[in-house]
Amino acid sequence: MTHFEQELADLKDKLLTMASLAESAVNKAIQALMERDDDLASAVKEEDSAIDRLEMELDGMAIDLLAKAPLASDLRLITVVMKISHDLERVGDEATTIARRSLAIRKRPAPSSRATRRWTGPTNNCITNCPITWFNSPP
């Protein structure tokens, strides 16, 4: 494996780590909302900085790779990683918003877990599985 290929692999790995953190943030935020767990909601807000930091690291790595005049297929990969990382950062921000709202409404009754699972399940599966599927598909 060349140095460039290793850097591409590192870029993919870091994006998957970011996707995992974003998925975890959504899960924790929903759990905090459902269980009215103030500590968990606060943890989601604090952990958002790790997702923000990963977006900046991925952008830096991508820019470094772009400077090495990659092939067209590599260029597409690098560009998509930058776009996905931006979207994952927004997912982290939205998880923080859910956590903040759960703190604001903690005295109210929690929503039914069945209804919540219906609208959170598909979202959580997509957060991590979409980048994995894309990386494993042929160019």
Image (tube, grey):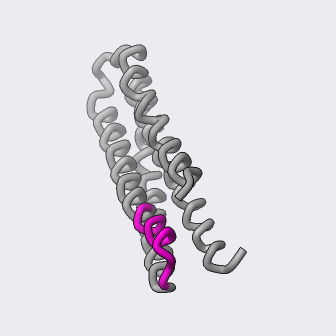
Up the image or down, 92 lies above or below 112; here it is below
- In this view, the residue farthest toward the right is 1
Residue 133: % across, % down: 54, 46
Q: Residue at x 48, y 42 (%)?
A: 23
Q: Nearer the viewer, residue 15 or 30?
A: 15
Residue 117 versus residue 64 in the image, above or below: above
Give the overall secondary structure of the magenta segment: helix
* Residue for point 45% across, 79% down: 66
Comparing 92 with 38, the one in front is 92
Is 12 on the left-hand or right-hand side of 82?
A: right
Quarter of the figure with residue 105: top left
Q: Is residue 53 visible?
A: no
Q: Where is residue 19 in the image (x, y as percent from the top left)?
A: 50, 50
Where's residue 38, x and y in %?
A: 41, 34
The residue sitting at 56% across, 54% down in the picture is 138
Where's the N terminus, which quadrant? bottom right
Q: In the rendered structure, which segment of residues is drawn in magenta?
A: 69-80
Residue at figure coordinates x 46%, y 68% from the top left: 78
Q: Is residue 70 magenta?
A: yes
Res. 67 visible in picture: yes
